[in-house]
Image: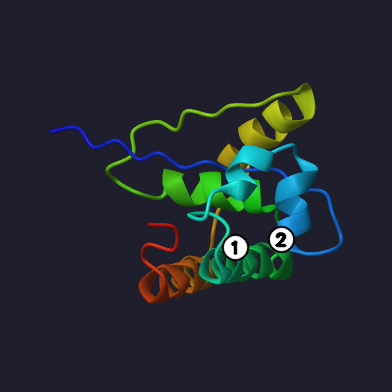
Amino acid sequence: MYRVVCVRVFFFQAEDGIRDLVRSRGLGDVYKRQRYNSPVTFEVVRKYLDIANQNGISMAKMSLAYLLTKSFVSSVIIGATDNIQLKENIESIHVKLSDEILNEIELVHKDFSNPAP
């Protein structure tokens, strides 16, 4: 039995909140979709971002490192638009998430299991 997990991780550089973060990477089409443009989605992204920031890691590294903790994930397929993103994605294999971080992530997932239906 094979399970496929697809996670899209966006790199954001902005100061004015999640909406501006989404726009800043040229994701206008994604931003316009109601599915991703809901208060719940932005709240969930903010919670994950807070966990990453509190632990001194990027959200991208945290997301990829989280996937690697799952027994049903044999490999993570990454995508990058430049060498900086590629380097950060690759460096995620060196990130070891503590039980505390994993529990925080799981609590967010428990409260918002499908934030963008």
In the depicted structure, whether residue 25 falls above or below residue 15: above
Packing grade of label 2 (10 A; few <14, some 14-19, many >=20) is some
Residue 31 lies, in percent from the top left, at 63, 48
Residue 64 lies, in percent from the top left, at 53, 44
Q: Between marks 1 and 2, how big is the CA–CA gap? A: 8 Å
Q: Residue at x 41, y 69 (%)?
A: 106
Residue 40 appears in the rendering: yes
Q: Residue at x 60, y 65 (%)?
A: 42
Amino acid type at image mark 2:
Ile
Look at the numbered discs 1 and 2 and tell me whether their residues touch, using CB distance below 8 Å: yes
The picture quadrant where one finds residue 38 is bottom right
Side of 50 relative to 68 (left or right) = right
Q: Nearer the viewer, residue 114 or 65?
A: 114
Residue 10 lies, in percent from the top left, at 64, 43
Q: Residue at x 62, y 39 (%)?
A: 29
Packing grade of label 1 (10 A; few <14, some 14-19, many >=20) is some
Amino acid type at image mark 1:
Val
Question: What residue sits right under mark 1 in the picture?
Answer: 45
Mark 2 residue element: helix
Mark 1 residue element: helix
Q: Residue at x 59, y 62 (%)?
A: 45
Q: Which mark is residue 18?
A: 2
The picture quadrant where one finds residue 27 is top right
Side of 81 relative to 114 (left or right) = right
Residue, far right: 15
Q: Which mark is residue 55?
A: none
Residue, far left: 1
